[in-house]
Image: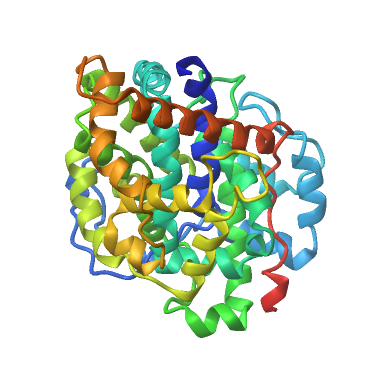
Amino acid sequence: MENLSRRNMLKAGGTVGAVGALATVGQATPWTWSPAGSVPGRGSGANPQGVWDDEADPVVAKLLERGQVQRVNELLRGWTKNGQPLPAGLPNELRDFMEHARQLPSWTDRGKLETAVRFNQKRGTYLGVLYGFASGMMSTVIPREARAVYYSQGGADMKDRITKTAKLGYDIGSLNAYRPDGEMIVTCLKTRLAHASVRTLLPQSPWWNHSAQEKIPISQADIMVTWHSLPTTVMRMLNRWNVPIAADESAGFLHSWQITAHMLGVQDQYIPNSWNQADAQARQVLDPILAPTPEGKKLADILLDLGMNLDLSLLSRGVLGALTRFMLGDKIADWLEIPREPVWSPLLETAWGPYVLVREGLLQVGMPKEAYWLFDEFLRQFVLFYMSELRMPINITIPVGNNPRYS
């Protein structure tokens, strides 16, 4: 079970958890977080809610204006590895941007990235569940994110959408994530291009304009909101479950996500330099803005119904709903109109803590073997469920329109 989960639970968690990865947007809040707590320890302090991507946005806007996006998508289909040369035939301004944007930041610590691999190997089982049912379902109660996902092109086919965005969760946990033979740089850069396209296209949607408060989606603040729904939320939950984590592995995990934020186009002055700073920023920009929306409720329904057509007895809507309630709490589950499951809800509440301790070798007795088996079987089925979605090569593309159902 452990060997299976290390690699594939990250795939699975990436699939559900990354539902917001291609349209990461949040809710407007006052900005008081100091750049002194950032990776460089300094910055202008400008409110990131009014900052987007000055490098990528004009390049992609020109591609859309000239009708070049389809051709660019075709050319980039075969560009999959970090160290692979860019394909010939790209527009000059796009090539120049990508060559610059594919470079890792000067503060990259290869030692920490190697330590992050060890963390992902040891905690893959937990990460899959947390990316899926803490981070993924949380995205449905981040109002701006839910609306952007729902009305953008990806909202027309959520199965295709989450399969593509699965790469972010999978690639960051792979052994060679940022090495030349890995794919994380490519995934981040293609995602950044997709973000830029959404910034141009989504304001043209009358449905999004009617429901959204902002004029332009996916600000720097919005990306960090979703960033906190991933690593910050994961670390909060692991600490809540009393999972023992070595200090160097914790730092490595954080560093891998700091690099990811940078590669997605976030200015360094907005990237927290420690878990304490990440938690402080999240308390300001993530925790207060969680709220239900009609779009978010519909997205949650889609996610909870993903296992309906599979012969996997433990992936029923009721079980997935119970796990969502356990991870995110009664308030959010009630917002999403997820009923309390009479068997799994109390079982999770009473037995998950001991289950974690047993897995960590910290508890030898007090855990009914039936409950332990159920949890292990759930994790096994969770892996099997998403494996079939990730067997084929996944190609992240630049969108050329919005959700046609709401055009």
Residue at 21 percent of width and 14 percent of height: 364
* Camera-nearest residue between 144 and 100: 144
Direction from residue 283 to residue 28 in the image, left or right: right
Horizontally, is 198 left or right of 237 in the view?
right
Q: Is residue 107 visible?
A: no
Which of the two residues, 250 or 217, is positioned nearer the viewer here?
A: 250
Q: Position of residue 257 (x, y in %)?
A: 39, 36
Tell me what residue is drawn at x 57 percent, y 67 percent. 150
Q: Is residue 1 above or below residue 184?
A: above
Q: Position of residue 39 (x, y in %)?
A: 27, 38
Where is 13 relative to 307, above or below?
above
User: Which residue is found at the position 51% from the left and 18% from the top?
Assistant: 175
- Quadrant of res 290: bottom left
Judge by depth and name the residue closer to the eye, 50 or 321: 321
Residue 390 in view of the camera:
yes
Question: Is residue 285 shown above or below 42?
Answer: below
Give the residue at x 49% y 72%. Answer: 216
Measured as percent of width and height from the top left, residue 298 is found at 53, 68
Q: Position of residue 65 (x, y in %)?
A: 74, 68
Please tell me how many numbered marks the rendered image carries. 0
Answer above or below: position of 371 versus 206. above
Q: How is the image coloured?
A: rainbow
**Residue 407 figure quarter:** bottom right
